[in-house]
Image (spheres, rainbow, N blue to C red):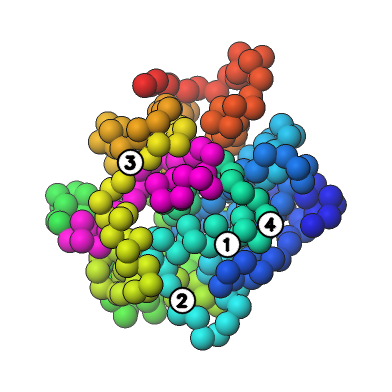
């Protein structure tokens, strides 16, 4: 990739430009590639219903600190496409980590710091747990999110079940058709409930909503949530990997977990997942009304966490940080 591609970002409107495409595994991946080509790599992974623009401010901060920053569209989003029409549109948890490894392989990057939220945080967890040699460290919003259909069979208290209403909606064909027809309205509702104090504007929303026009988007989203409930099969080739993940393997790579103080999305209590991080670890709560889309709502706090995991934030930068962070260090 050219230096022009790696350095192209428009800070005025938070939009990345231009995108690159690279064949990696099952996918032709659309991504932004910023920073020096020989810099230590950082892989930033978005969630649902979001896209790469969650990192529009984070990525330039990391690139300016000397990192090569990769921000790919996940399968089913933006310009990422399946290379074959015959490939099953699989959304089970492990495939996103396999996609990430394929991307690193295609770019000849042996390892990276991996950071994400929502689906992206789960993917970072999976990479760190199963392929620690490819993950030098991680930043994970909402902590440890690895799950399994078997564990998800256990009922939750009614209030908790209510927060997962869309998961049950997607289990029905009515829900599939509803998401197909109203995916923009759906995303807007999730943004407002997951980040109740984030006053995003229409330009910000529309820029991300365009990523949902991907022809595989609905298939991937529906399969992801149905697989979680055991209502759709994953690929048998991945059964052993999913069996290992179902055992909730500890994560030994250096980790910082983050949560916003106004996170309205379903998420575990930090104390519940602390024992699952066996290496260097820190948990930070980001104050000021920050919700679920933490990298877009608090980009400096997110970037600082990545730099701290990577060991590349200078002491004077840490001293100057003015973000409202309540940190519990372990």
SS at mark 3?
Answer: loop
Q: Which residue is mark 2?
A: 89
Q: Which residue is mark 1?
A: 102
Q: Residues within 10 Å of mark 3 (few under 14, many from 20)?
A: some
Q: Nearer the viewer, residue 35 or 173?
A: 35
SS at mark 1?
Answer: helix
Highlighted magenta segment, given as a residue range: 127-153
Q: Which residue is mark 4?
A: 107
Determine which quarter of the picture holds residue 170. Answer: bottom left
**Disc nearer the start of the sequence (2/3):** 2
Above or below: residue 314 compared with residue 26: above
**Disc nearer the start of the sequence (4/3):** 4
Q: Residues within 10 Å of mark 1 (few under 14, many from 20)?
A: some
Q: Which residue is mark 3?
A: 250
Q: Quarter holding the N terminus? A: bottom right
**Residue 329 drawn at (x, y percent):** 39, 20
SS at mark 2?
Answer: loop
Q: Does residue 131 show up magenta in the picture?
A: yes
**Residue 142 drawn at (x, y percent):** 38, 41
Spatial CA span between label 1 and label 3: 23 Å
Spatial CA span between label 4 and label 1: 9 Å
SS at mark 4?
Answer: loop
Q: Nearer the viewer, mark 2 or mark 4?
A: 4
Q: Are marks 4 and 3 in contact (CB under 8 Å)?
A: no
**Residue 279 drawn at (x, y percent):** 40, 31
Q: Does residue 322 show up magenta in the picture?
A: no
């Amino acid at each position: 990739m050219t230096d022009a591609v790696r350095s192209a970002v428009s800070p005025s409107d938070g939009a990345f430009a231009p995108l690159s495409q690279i064949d990696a595994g099952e996918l032709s991946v659309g991504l932004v590639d910023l920073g020096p080509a020989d810099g230590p790599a950082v892989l930033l992974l978005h969630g649902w219903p979001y896209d790469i623009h969650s990192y529009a401010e984070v990525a330039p901060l990391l690139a300016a600190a000397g990192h090569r920053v990769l921000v790919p569209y996940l399968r089913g989003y933006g310009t990422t496409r399946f290379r074959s029409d015959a490939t099953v549109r699989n959304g089970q948890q492990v495939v996103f980590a396999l996609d990430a490894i394929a991307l690193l392989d295609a770019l000849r990057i042996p390892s990276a710091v991996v950071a994400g939220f929502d689906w992206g945080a789960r993917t970072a967890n999976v990479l760190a747990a199963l392929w620690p040699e490819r993950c030098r460290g991680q930043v994970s919003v909402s902590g440890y999110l690895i799950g399994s259909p078997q564990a998800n069979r256990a009922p939750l208290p009614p209030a908790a079940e209510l927060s997962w209403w869309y998961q049950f909606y997607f289990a029905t064909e009515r829900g599939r058709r509803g998401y197909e027809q109203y995916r923009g309205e759906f995303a807007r509702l999730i943004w407002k409930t997951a980040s109740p104090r984030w006053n995003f504007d229409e330009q910000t929303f529309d820029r991300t909503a365009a990523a949902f026009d991907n022809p595989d988007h609905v298939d991937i989203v529906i399969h992801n949530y149905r697989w979680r409930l055991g209502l759709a099969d994953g690929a048998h080739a991945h059964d052993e990997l999913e069996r290992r993940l179902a055992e909730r393997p500890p994560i030994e790579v250096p980790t910082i977990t983050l949560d916003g103080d106004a996170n309205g999305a379903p998420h575990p209590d930090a104390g519940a997942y602390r024992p699952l991080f066996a290496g260097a670890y820190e948990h930070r709560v980001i104050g000021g009304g920050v919700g679920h889309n933490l990298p877009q709502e608090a980009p400096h706090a997110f970037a600082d966490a990545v730099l701290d995991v990577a060991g590349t934030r200078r002491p004077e930068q840490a001293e100057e940080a003015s973000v409202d962070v309540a940190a519990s260090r372990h």
